[in-house]
């Protein structure tokens, strides 16, 4: 075998060799020539030819080595040596990123993660680390390995918009050996390729010999399985009624053109009849249902396989959390900061916006100083819980800080734990931006921290069910705000850390919870009672975005978390966050009680036993209100020692809230609450 027949390219700078063209070679149209490659870290070889099947690339590399050995009068590789080469290969995919950028996805073997990281180190010589990701993260071993390195951010981020999903689907159109058409939708997780009915039927447009070549390619490849055990080609939405066996009965090489086209037509009919739904006859990227279906197949992902879901975060965070670089904790408990931040000059604006958030590193640094028993930690940024409430009414008004993060931490000898971190809304930087002096800003920021804790204590004393603990920590950052003369000055920024409350937020409960044939009616009544109990302290503390009688309160809007018992029935509602408490604290409670009818009104179509649920809701509210009213006076002096007793201070608000509570008539409030529900749902309550 002549070594010269193999195309070899050598990258002398990085000491990497290619069997085939370079990994990022492009055609005349500027598109990537290949999207699949196989890395051999030990020999620093990357194979890009002869096809996009990793098995073929391994075979080609073995053929190349044997040709070299033959030229050197050495014996060919033994079967054991061949197996060793295949066992030490790492499959990768190359994805278009636009503007000549590329991303590489490593598909590791979970039993050989060290090998995958050797390939990762080699690839980092060829492109920046922040453009190299890992797939097959449905496997817990792979996930755990990434977590332990503090690299959850390197799990390939999936798009969250229709346009992003369309781009992903288009980028995952692949060839095998024949390059005329990108027929297959490639699953980077498993290495399987999906062939749709429309793509298969459109092969009749090809000339006879090209059609023959494609049918043979599909026939051979659909019969093979890759090393993960998946077929190289799967017929999309055909189930088990149309498989590789349908093609095996034909000898395409022996057919003339008429017989070949008739065979193709017959296969099209069989494929069509096997479709689970005629809807899948057409590839329709613009159709949301078709797009979601193909996207879920090529990413092999749903809410249950996301990193967030597997960590224990609720469904609303699945596919929405942006995991960020922080650092790796070594065996000594020291923090090795991720070097990706040193590469920010190589990033695009969107990459920089997504990855270059300095806060995770600051939080991690603060945490490492306090505990030397950390094994690993990962930090991600969360979307706003109530984004509609975060719009500033005027661009001239000061902008509060809205950063919310989730931190996963593993301490030695303890299970993993999740915590939510929220930056202080008004801190030194925000105070300076409002035009305050440096001294006033420092003092006001400290006062605001105290106010947050005092407000939390007040809510607790008025029997709002809250997380058991809240820690206040600080990190140092550099001020770059509106006061230019203070740019570059280090300032302390406060943040609050609490345990993550596992459960389901009340406003995301589906109709299935209430209409379960086995326990839906009981579930509805228990849930309604608990929600009514949660409404009572919420009304009392005047929880609202603005101090306006016509402004609806903040309630049942993303902060209330329902926890279930072992039988799946409501156990407790915990208020995970309490922004807006003690805002509406002066006017009569009568002005707000009508708004608390909305939680039942909006669920009227869901709950079959609606009257019983409404009665439970109102009675839950009434009993809880009476309970709070009976004990609140015991805490009248709680905030007497606070030095600030000005109007609007916590001391002042507390007195107003207790005065209003003392004078309230629980029965009259409950009657108004019921009447407000009755006005909107009269037919359901008769």
Image (cartoon, rainbow, N blue to C red):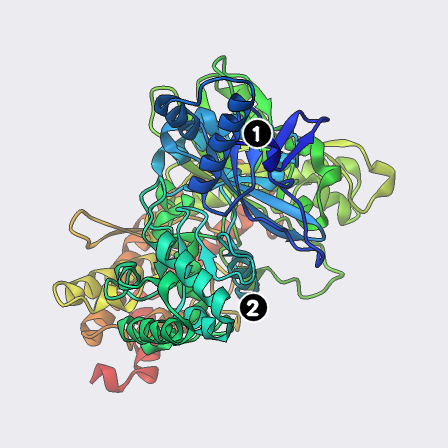
Q: Residue at x 27, y 65 (%)?
A: 242
Q: Is residue 572 above or below residue 342?
A: below
Q: Residue at x 45, y 24 (%)?
A: 114
The secondary structure type at the circle numbered 1 is strand
Q: Is residue 360 left or right of residue 300?
A: right
Callouts 1 and 2 close, C-beta under 8 Å: no
Callout in the foreground (1, 2) = 1
Q: Residue furthest right?
A: 485
Q: Position of residue 654 (x, y in %)?
A: 49, 49
Q: Position of residue 24 (x, y in %)?
A: 65, 44
Dot 1 or dot 2: first in sequence order is 1
Q: Position of residue 671 (x, y in %)?
A: 29, 74
64 or 473: which is nearer to us? Answer: 64
340 or 26: which is nearer to us? Answer: 26
Residue 642 in view in this figure: no
Q: Which mark, residue 548?
A: 2
520 or 596: which is nearer to us? Answer: 520
Q: Residue at x 28, y 59 (%)?
A: 248
């Amino acid at each position: 075998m002549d070594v010269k027949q193999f195309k070899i390219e050598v990258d002398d700078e990085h000491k990497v060799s290619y069997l085939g063209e370079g990994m990022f070679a492009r055609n005349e149209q500027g598109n990537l020539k290949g999207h699949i490659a196989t890395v051999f870290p030990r020999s620093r070889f990357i194979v890009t030819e002869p096809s996009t099947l990793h098995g073929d690339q391994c075979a080609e590399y073995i053929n190349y080595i044997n040709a070299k050995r033959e030229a050197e009068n050495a014996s060919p590789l033994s079967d054991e040596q061949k197996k060793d080469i295949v066992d030490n290969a790492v499959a990768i995919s190359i994805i278009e990123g636009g503007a000549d950028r590329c991303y590489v996805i490593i598909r590791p073997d979970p039993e050989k993660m060290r090998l995958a990281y050797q390939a990762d180190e080699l690839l980092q010589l060829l492109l920046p680390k922040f453009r190299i990701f890992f797939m097959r993260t449905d496997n817990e071993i792979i996930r755990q390995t990434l977590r332990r390195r503090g690299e959850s951010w390197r799990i390939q981020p999936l798009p969250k918009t229709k346009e992003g999903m369309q781009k992903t689907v288009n980028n995952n159109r692949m060839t095998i050996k024949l390059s005329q058409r990108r027929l297959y939708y490639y699953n980077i997780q498993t290495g399987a390729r999906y062939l749709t009915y429309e793509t298969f039927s459109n092969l009749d447009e090809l000339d006879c010999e090209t059609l023959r070549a494609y049918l043979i390619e599909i026939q051979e490849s659909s019969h093979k399985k890759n090393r993960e055990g998946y077929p190289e080609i799967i017929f999309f939405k055909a189930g088990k009624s149309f498989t590789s066996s349908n093609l095996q009965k034909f000898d395409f090489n022996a057919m003339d053109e008429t017989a070949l086209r008739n065979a193709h037509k017959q296969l099209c009919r069989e494929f069509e009849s096997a479709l689970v739904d005629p809807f899948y006859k057409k590839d329709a990227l613009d159709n949301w249902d078709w797009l979601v279906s193909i996207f879920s197949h090529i990413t092999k992902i749903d809410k249950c396989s996301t990193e967030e879901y597997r960590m224990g975060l609720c469904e609303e965070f699945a596919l929405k959390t942006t995991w960020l670089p922080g650092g790796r904790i070594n065996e000594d408990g020291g923090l090795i900061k991720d070097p990706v931040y040193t590469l920010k000059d190589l990033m695009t604006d969107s990459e920089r916006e997504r990855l270059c958030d300095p806060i995770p590193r600051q939080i991690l640094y603060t945490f490492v100083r306090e505990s030397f028993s950390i094994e690993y930690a990962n930090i991600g940024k969360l979307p706003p819980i109530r984004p509609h409430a975060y719009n500033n009414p005027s661009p001239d008004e000061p902008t509060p800080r809205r950063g919310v993060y989730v931190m996963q931490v593993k301490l030695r000898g303890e299970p993993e734990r999740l915590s939510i971190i929220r930056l202080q809304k008004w801190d030194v930087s925000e105070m300076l931006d409002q035009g305050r002096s440096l001294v006033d800003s420092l003092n006001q920021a400290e006062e605001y921290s105290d106010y947050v804790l005092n407000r939390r204590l007040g809510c607790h004393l008025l029997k709002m069910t809250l997380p058991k603990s809240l820690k206040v920590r600080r990190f140092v950052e550099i001020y770059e705000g509106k006061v230019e003369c203070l740019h570059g000055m280090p300032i302390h920024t406060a943040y609050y850390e609490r345990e993550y409350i596992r459960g389901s937020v009340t406003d995301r409960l589906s109709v299935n919870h209430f209409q379960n044939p086995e326990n839906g009616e009981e579930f509805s009544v228990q849930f309604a009672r608990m929600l009514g109990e949660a409404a009572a302290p919420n009304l009392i503390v005047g929880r609202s975005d603005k101090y306006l009688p016509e402004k609806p309160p903040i309630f049942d809007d993303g902060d209330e978390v329902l926890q279930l018992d072992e039988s799946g029935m409501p156990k407790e509602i915990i208020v995970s966050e309490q922004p807006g408490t003690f805002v509406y604290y002066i006017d009569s409670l009568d002005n707000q009680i009508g708004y608390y009818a909305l939680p039942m009104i909006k669920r009227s179509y869901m709950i079959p036993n609606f009257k019983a649920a409404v009665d439970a809701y109102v009675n839950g509210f009434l009993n809880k209100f009476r309970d709070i009213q009976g004990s609140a006076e015991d805490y009248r002096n709680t905030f007497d020692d606070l030095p600030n007793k000005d109007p609007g201070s916590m001391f002042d608000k507390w007195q107003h809230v207790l005065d209003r509570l003392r004078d309230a008539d629980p029965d009259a409030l409950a009657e108004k609450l019921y009447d407000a529900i009755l006005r909107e749902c009269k037919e359901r309550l008769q």
